[in-house]
Amino acid sequence: MNVRRSAAALAAIGVLAAAAPATAIGQAPSPTPKVTVPAGLYGKGDPTYDGVWRQSLTLIAQRTLGYRPAGQAVDWLAGQQCADGSFAAFRADAAKDCDKSVKADTNSTAAAVQALRSVGGRGAAVDKAVGWLKSAQNADGGWSYFPGAPSDTNSTSVVVGALAAAGTDPADVRKSGKSPYDALAGWAVPCGRDGGGALAFQPDKKGRLTANADATAAAVPAALGKGFVASAGKAPAETGCAEGDHLKPAQVADNAGAYLAAAVAKSGHLTSAMPGAKDQPDFGNTADTVVALAADGRTAQAKKSYAWLEKNASQWAAQSGPAAYAQLILAAHAVGAEPGDFAGTSLVRSLNAQGPAPKAEKAATEKAAASDDDSKTGVWWFVGACLVAGIGIGFLLSGRKKRQP
């Protein structure tokens, strides 16, 4: 079962949705009846569980493409922040002060930090959010979804990305002498065990670690000090699984990367099961795996998995909305692919159509123009080829007629 998905998504969605924050079952806030999607927010679905998350991923993806997000969209996200710096999954009435009924969480806050940092000009909001995240750190060096609960790999990973984006070295953020890198290393399954090299979501009640592909995909960029945006890194220095009681962050990443590469080697994708349903491809976590593999320097396998997504993920993205399109764009960025041509679909246009249109800056404009030129060239080449073929057929038919008795 995919623990990153909200309780509502697990219960209600027939297809695997975009990766959502690491909400544990039973921890999700109660749905808001008849929520109206506010202006400035991307997507048309109920934002109760993922409003800040999907908005953050959207803005990050747009900035990665070279677009300047619409001011209305940035203002909506910034307006979700509580006075103490935290963010909840969604606040229907941001005009009201946050109180005990607002369930602030680390995942929404960390995602918002990465988004606001990427758009620039929101330094005060970013600093306040980072301060809140530091205050929510657990004694093991990690973070839980809601402060006060046991730490988990996914929440810790997204917070590491936020710290790095804000210019803070995650290794320097410590509680009881431990950093988030200590926590990640502690959740790595030992090499000799089943699932060795992977990370568990969190230890079970007896302290046992069970490999979790979703958590592993989240942990690889984090162990490398990266957030949602990552490009191809250097190939791993070690080919085998590094063992030891005190693994370095790079060793955690390489071990986890090897596990993921093996997990997708045969089919190209990760597989997950919804309650009561057969196993099926997990599109969102496969996209995260592409980013993880690329960040760890395993570009060949990353490109193979991206090629699988390109063939199979268009319908999933259309059904899931902005966070899914953003994930695919970030996967394309990681392997150097063109998101404007995703098996005939433009991820760029599809994402931007989900809300207020961003402004194309020079880099994005030039890239789009080049893509259009390539497209036009392809069309005219096809037309020309057809004309030449037609002329050839004409000569062939003419010759046949001349040879007839």
Image (spheres, helix red, strand yellow):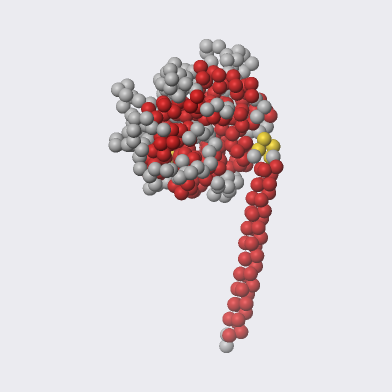
Q: Is residue 223 above or below residue 269?
A: above
The quadrant of the image that shows the N terminus is: top left
Q: Nearer the viewer, residue 319 or 167?
A: 167
Q: Nearer the viewer, residue 74 or 154?
A: 154
Task: Give coordinates of residue 62: x percent, y percent.
Answer: 62, 37
One can see residue 101 in this view: yes
Task: Give coordinates of residue 222: x percent, y percent.
Answer: 48, 32
User: Which quadrant of the view contains residue 65?
Assistant: top right
Q: Is residue 16 left or right of residue 73?
A: left
Q: Is residue 327 above or below residue 207?
A: below
Q: Residue at x 30, y 22 (%)?
A: 206
Judged from this view, the residue extending furthest toward the bottom is 405
Q: Nearer the viewer, residue 333 or 311?
A: 333
Q: Residue at x 64, y 24 (%)?
A: 123
The quadrant of the image that shows the C terminus is: bottom right
Q: Residue at x 66, y 55 (%)?
A: 376
Q: Residue at x 35, y 40 (%)?
A: 241
Q: Is residue 94 left or right of residue 212?
A: right
Task: Give coordinates of residue 127: x percent, y percent.
Answer: 60, 21
Task: Give coordinates of residue 33: x percent, y percent.
Answer: 54, 20
User: Which quadrant of the view contains residue 355?
Assistant: top right
Q: Nearer the viewer, residue 220 or 94?
A: 220
One can see residue 2 in this view: no
Q: Is residue 296 above or below residue 375?
A: above
Q: Is residue 15 above or below residue 140?
A: below
User: Which quadrant of the view contains residue 12?
Assistant: top left
The count of marks equals: 0
